[in-house]
Image: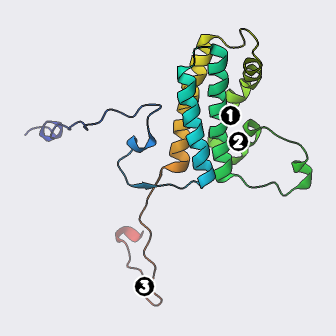
Amino acid sequence: MASSSAAAAPRRRAGSPAPSLTGPAGDVHPVPRRSAAPPAALELLAKARSGLDEAAVLHEPNERYATAHLAALRTAAAVLAARGRPETNKRRRERIRSAWEVLPEIAPELTEWSALFASGALRRARAEAGMPGAASGRDADDLLRDAAMFLRLVERLLVLQPVLPQPRPERPGEARPERPGGG
């Protein structure tokens, strides 16, 4: 008898290429999806994408670094716009905190990304100030790549929530059928 793997038909590759780090989020998954993010978050994500596109064509490393970092900051702001809640404790509201400080509280799954971009904030300030050598070409390219990956991740977290079937409402007086196995 033939093995089960030999009997399986070869998979047909999809006509489109694999999703890219910077491509549209719609190419990630074939399941119908809906936007779960508020309009302000969607606008910030669009501005972040535009910033990454702009950074990719800049030749000066300082400008490329600063623009890519700003795109990452806009991406973080989109998460805060979608998930954040205003501080109710007056004592905590007195101190202004950076997005990189608040992001891990709102989205713990992005803590490492927050630390990465927070560590580049001083370099970004130097690059924006026009300090020569604030960012090398490699620094700028690495940050651009990281910011693009961060944007894609956040788009998948916020924008592309799968549309799941809703449970059927139970009618009063109807008993649920028992599942086999007692579940």
In the rendered image, is residue 128 in sight? Answer: yes
Q: In which quadrant of the rendered image does the C terminus lie? A: bottom left
Q: Check disc 2 and give the amino acid type.
A: Leu
Q: Residue 102 vs residue 172: left or right? A: right
Which residue is labeled 1 in the image?
Answer: 114
Instruction: Please report contact status of discs 1 and 3: CB closer than 8 Å, yes or no.
Output: no
Q: Is residue 159 above or below residue 12?
A: below
Give SS at disc 1. Answer: helix
Q: In which quadrant of the rendered image does the N terminus lie? A: top left
Q: Check disc 1 and give the amino acid type.
A: Ser
Instruction: Please report contact status of discs 3 and 2: CB closer than 8 Å, yes or no.
Output: no
Q: Percent position (x, y) of residue 178?
A: 38, 76
Which residue is labeled 3 in the image?
Answer: 175
Q: CA distance from mark 1 to mark 2?
A: 7 Å
Give SS at disc 2. Answer: helix
Q: Which numbered mark, 3 or 2, is in the foreground of this view?
A: 2
Instruction: Write the residue at 74% across / 26% down.
Output: 121
First in sequence: mark 1 or mark 3? 1
Instruction: Write the residue at 38% across / 41% down.
Output: 27
First in sequence: mark 1 or mark 2? 2
**Image quadrant in which you'd find residue 61:** top right
Q: Nearer the viewer, residue 137 or 110?
A: 137
